[in-house]
Amino acid sequence: MMPGDKKFKTKELSAQINSAMLSFAGPEDMLKYLDIEPGSVSIMGLMNDKDHAVKLLIDEVVFKDEFLGCHPCVNTSSLKLRTEDVIKKFLPAVGHDYQTVKLRGEE
């Protein structure tokens, strides 16, 4: 999870999580693990990950804002949630933890 205006660099994240072969999940895996379609990826999808197979990574910048935006598992709507509520209430309620990462997003 990261701000939408930041560039994502696979190599930068790979080094932080010790993953040599980092790639995006395909549509089949998104349905299997989060029960969501491409384009609708959201932290809310973690409520469908009953086996806790998905690892949540959060860019440290996300914690600086009081609110965060996400889809309610469909991309036709958006939610504005308190960041603290997501971290302290939602994630524990769905049994998920997270790892903080530092993404520069620079060239």
Image (tube, helix red, strand yellow):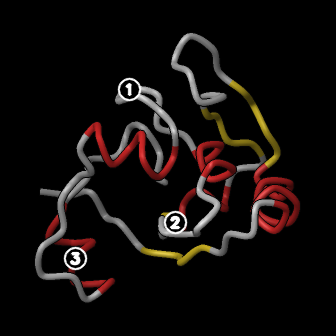
Give the residue type that dot 1 points to.
Gly
Of residues 61 and 101, the one nearer the viewer is: 101
Please tell me whether mark 1 sits on a helix, a strand or a loop.
Answer: loop
Q: Give whichever of discs 2 and 1 has the lower sequence position.
A: 1
Mark linked to residue 66: none
Q: Residue furthest bottom?
A: 18
- The residue indicated by pointer 1 is 39
Please tell me whether mark 3 sits on a helix, a strand or a loop.
Answer: helix
Give the residue type that dot 3 points to.
Ser
Place of residue 91 in the rendered image (x, y in percent of width and height, measured from the top left): 75, 62
**Residue 16 versus residue 42 in the image, above or below:** below
**Residue 48 versus residue 16 in the image, above or below:** above
Place of residue 52 in the rendered image (x, y in percent of width and height, measured from the top left): 58, 69
Left or right side of 12 for 82: right
Of residues 68 and 44, the one nearer the viewer is: 44
Give the residue type that dot 2 points to.
Leu
Left or right side of 96 for 66: right
- The residue indicated by pointer 3 is 14
Q: Give whichever of discs 1 and 3 has the lower sequence position.
A: 3
Place of residue 11 in the rendered image (x, y in percent of width and height, measured from the top left): 14, 70
Q: Give whichever of discs 3 and 2 has the lower sequence position.
A: 3
Place of residue 71 in the rendered image (x, y in percent of width and height, measured from the top left): 60, 28
